[in-house]
Image: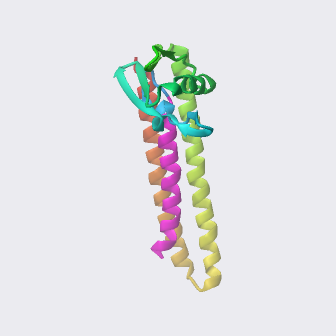
Amino acid sequence: MDEKLKVYEEKMTKAFDFLTSDFATIRAGRANPHVLDKIRVDYYGTPTPIQQVGNITVPEPRMIQIAPWEKTLIKEIEKAIMASDLGITPSNDGAVIRLVFPELTEERRKDLVKEVKKKGEEGKVAVRNIRRDGNDAFKKLAKEDVSEDQIKQLEEKLQKITDRFIKDIDKIVEEKSKEILTV
């Protein structure tokens, strides 16, 4: 019976992991190289992640430095950053590109917290949808000579798994919100 639960637990884990990686791309006033994760650079006609065309470092708390492996890529990397929703203008000295993150305003911090809470809610909805799919699948087991008690047990176990993931989502939303509001 537990293998039936495992499928839904794995789906919930994927939803949670997606949310966690999504939170990593939200900047909180400090330079975090993960804000570049979604940006692709045109590398000889192929959209390539920035991490694969240069070395990314954080020399100061509010600065990211990108040292491309090929100097010819500087313009392409700058173009990709400008086209992204990062909202930061890159500067280069011919060898490296620097992204300086301005201090976040109080209003911007509050907007980011709202965004985090919204994404957290979407994560919870995804987990609950997986639970619903699981419960629907368990109800169909009644046709396969599975007793109502066994179905009830599966539903209760799935509910416990769901509760655990909802609690985890609430925890990471709280942590990210605190991180954003810390000046």
Does 38 appear above or below 1?
Answer: above
Residue 89 to residue 41: above or below: above
In the rendered image, is residue 127 in sight? yes
Residue 94 in percent (x, y) is at 46, 16
At x 44% / y 53%, what residue is drawn?
Answer: 164
Q: Residue at x 48, y 35 (%)?
A: 53
Q: Main secondary structure of the magenta part?
A: helix
Quarter in which the C terminus is drawn: top left
The structure's colour scheme is rainbow
Note whether 156 is above or below 56 in the view shown.
Answer: below
Residue appearing at x 53%, y 63% in the figure: 8
Does 17 lie within the magenta span? yes
Q: Which one is nearer the viewer's eye here, 12 or 26?
A: 26
* Residue in front for this viewpoint, 161 or 123: 123
Query: Does the magenta segment cover residue 45?
Result: no
Q: Nearer the viewer, residue 91 or 58?
A: 91
Q: Position of residue 145 (x, y in %)?
A: 59, 86
The mark tally for this picture is: 0
**Residue numbers of the magenta segment:** 1-26
Query: Residue 147 appears at what percent x and percent y?
Result: 55, 82
142 lies left or right of 50: right
Query: For the view shown, which residue lies furthest in the left direction?
Result: 59
Whole-percent x and y of residue 19?
Answer: 51, 43
Residue located farthest toward the bottom when viewing the structure as drawn:
145
Horizontal side, residue 69 vs residue 46: left or right: left
Q: Is residue 100 visible?
A: no
